């Protein structure tokens, strides 16, 4: 997860709209964002799933044609993911990055029984959702297993129109190392 957010720090552009749910959004707060970037999200587990709903709304209120990027955990996406069909139906430009750790890793990190199955969710083939919801099968998305895969998927996302899904497979206990230097230093050094 740390390496993924370092790559995202360089992917984000001036004027992007970035949203997310809980863990994805909380980790985003450690990234120095480019100018004119707007973010919306929730850091409260009680609102799990709200971030994706916000993102769908963003896509329809995006009068300035800003690039929209949504960071969603697989567990939170399970709450409101059926609204993805709205993006497909209206062919909204939308980059959805699914943090696929097969469940609720934030809960696993704080629970003494981290491997208990109540924190697991059914694993979906998120990268195939565009096709599943009746969209162009050439725009399904990509499945990511390595850092190189992720870099390639970000490059591909820049070229795509309509909804595009990046299904990032992470370890079940892969959490941000909050005791390390934040990702904000990455962009800070670019301008010095």
Image (spheres, helix red, strand yellow):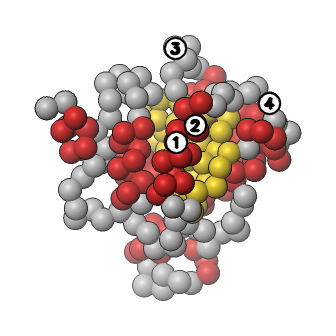
Callout 1–callout 2 Cβ contact below 8 Å: yes
SS class of the residue under badge 4? helix
Pick whichever of labels 3 and 2 is earlier in the sequence: 3
Q: Residue at x 36, y 59 (%)?
A: 2
SS class of the residue under badge 2? helix
In front: mark 3 or mark 2? 2
Number of residues whose C-alpha sits closer than 10 Å to that of mark 2, classed few (under 14), some (14–19) or many (20 or more)? many
The numbered dot on residue 89 is 4
Q: Residue at x 53, y 83 (%)?
A: 115
Residue of label 1: 154
Q: CA distance from mark 1 to mark 2?
A: 5 Å
Q: Residue at x 45, y 28 (%)?
A: 16
Q: Quadrant of the C terminus?
A: top left
Residue of label 3: 64
Q: Position of residue 91 (x, y in %)?
A: 74, 27
Residue of label 2: 157
Q: CA distance from mark 3 to mark 1?
A: 22 Å
């Amino acid at each position: 997860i740390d390496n993924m957010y370092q790559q995202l720090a360089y992917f984000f552009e001036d004027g992007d709209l970035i949203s997310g749910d809980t863990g994805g959004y909380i980790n985003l707060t450690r990234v120095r964002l480019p100018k004119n970037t707007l973010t919306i999200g929730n850091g409260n587990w009680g609102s799990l799933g709200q971030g994706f709903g916000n993102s769908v709304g963003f896509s329809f209120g995006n009068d300035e044609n800003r690039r929209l990027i949504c960071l969603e955990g697989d567990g939170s996406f399970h709450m409101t993911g059926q609204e993805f069909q709205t993006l497909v139906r209206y062919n909204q430009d939308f980059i959805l990055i699914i943090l696929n750790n097969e469940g609720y890793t934030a809960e696993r990190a704080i629970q003494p029984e981290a491997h208990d199955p109540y924190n697991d969710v059914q694993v979906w083939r998120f990268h195939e959702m565009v096709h599943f919801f009746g969209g162009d099968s050439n725009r399904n998305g990509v499945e990511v297993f390595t850092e190189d895969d992720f870099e390639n998927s970000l490059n591909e996302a820049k070229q795509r129109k309509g909804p595009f899904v990046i299904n990032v497979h992470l370890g079940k206990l892969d959490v941000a190392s909050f005791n390390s230097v934040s990702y904000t230093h990455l962009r800070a050094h670019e301008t010095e």
